[in-house]
Image: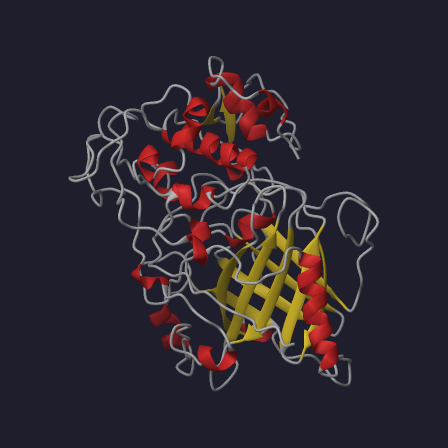
Amino acid sequence: MTITRIGFATAASAIALALAAGPAMAQWASEAEMIEANPDLTFYDPYEGDSAGRGWAYVDAREYQQVGASGDNVAASGGDAPEGVEPLERDLYTSDDFYVDAELWDDPRYFRCNSPLANESMWGAYGGNTANGDNPPLTTSWGFCDRGYPREGIVSPYQFETAQEHYETLLAEAEANGGPTEYSHDNPPPNWSGRYQRLGGLGENQEWGYENWWWGRITQIPTMLSVLTEEYQTRVVQEAYHQGNTNAAQWPSQYCWPEGMMRRWHQFSVQQPHQLLVTENLVQWLMGTADNFVLQYNIGREFNMEGAVPRLGQDVPRWYGESIGFWDGDALITWTSNIQGWVTHNAYEHSNQLQIIEIFTPMETENFSGLHHEAIFYDPEATVVPTRQIQWYRQLDQFDEVDPYIFIECNQTIFPIEGRAQPVSPGTTIEYTVPDLFGRPWAQIQEQYFEQDMERPEASSLFGF
């Protein structure tokens, strides 16, 4: 039986923001500038293609507006609830112990209907949201309770329970049709090599800015919590509390810590144009903004199934995992495993159990102009159901027509001082505790300085990877 590949579009306008720490953000060309430089460039609208003919069922997310309060775009300010909304007696911004509020976490009012991105930027991140009033956190503004991307757009539409089942089914389908397709030096794979830019990102031009739920602007926090296990729900609310209430956010990029696999799908970490190199036995992505992401898909190889998770090398998790894949005509299907658990701020943490199926297919335009990218995430420790994201990549040009990739080196100038990220001038001597990067260091800092009097669940102190 043919397994239909399905796609959900999750888009809203992108916003122009800058990283709070790390290297300077480059300025990428707008659509108008790209067209001026290359008049033959055709921009792809994923909502108006031949999706029906390809078997993709889209949920058009353009109707889902920004959820959370930001600047002057608030449902109500000064801590007052919007008209017609009955506030809770206790919420994230008035609570002195979010752990004891667990029964309230599934109510958007507990977060004053703020999205993950709005909540984390209340104290001035991303150039200054500052919608938290003159006496924060008590005066934190309300977002829009009648908005929010639906859970069905987050959950995978496939019936597979594991990445292995998903991959092996797609491989069997290809074999039934005479594949998988084998390419060689004399019969090369599709000519996808070149420089790409992901649709959606920085800049004033909104026409080509497509957004997904993982970015955290169009999603209510309880909707994200609904796909998580109890432990990982607690982790999300812990992070949200220390972003919106205590103003003690701990972002990996602030300290030049690793970004982690799932940061690759976030809004601001991979805005530098991507480089894609395609050979007959290896496909490689190189990308970055706050850090470098190098992902290699090994074509035709098989995983060693003896270990904690499927792997290619040693039984040790890798920051960006290890990947195998195969070609089904002009579609590239990959399976990534052996991933180091980590956090993506304003989204949820992933565990060492995370495995990912990715499907790359060319956009349906007259000539090849980019790639449609579908990713399905299987993480039985962190999520109660598999989840999925869709992205699009516009090919800017071949390698002989573009500037070299700008390799990122992060120079740490920010350190956690008494539990908060603080800039430290060169030559300054500080007392510094070396973090355990494999023991959720962000949570260790927050618990040490801001949770001394909280009723933290006993297992919470054991959280790790």
* Quadrant of res 188: bottom right
Note whether 317 is above or below 429 in the view shown.
Answer: below
Q: Is residue 277 above or below residue 16?
A: below
Task: State how many labels appear.
Answer: 0
Tell me if I can see residue 181 in this picture.
no
Image position of 244 (left or right of 291) = left
Colour scheme in the image? secondary structure
Task: Name the spot of residue 440 as percent of width and height, x first.
Answer: 60, 31
Residue 100 shows in this picture: yes
Quadrant into which the N terminus falls: bottom right
Instruction: Check the image and name the residue furthest to the left.
Output: 83
Q: Position of residue 299 (x, y in %)?
A: 75, 68
Q: Classify residue 271 as left or right of residue 12.
A: right
- Residue 37, placed above or below residue 416: below
Q: Residue at x 44, y 29 (%)?
A: 102
Q: Quadrant of the C terminus?
A: top right
Q: Quadrant of residue 152?
A: bottom left
Q: Is residue 240 left or right of residue 189?
A: left
Q: Position of residue 320 (x, y in %)?
A: 66, 50
Please give left or right for residue 180 compared with residue 391 in the image: right
Quick check: 1 above or below 139?
below
Tell me which residue sits at (37%, 62%) in the image: 209
Front residue of 62 and 110:
110
Q: Position of residue 432 (x, y in %)?
A: 59, 20
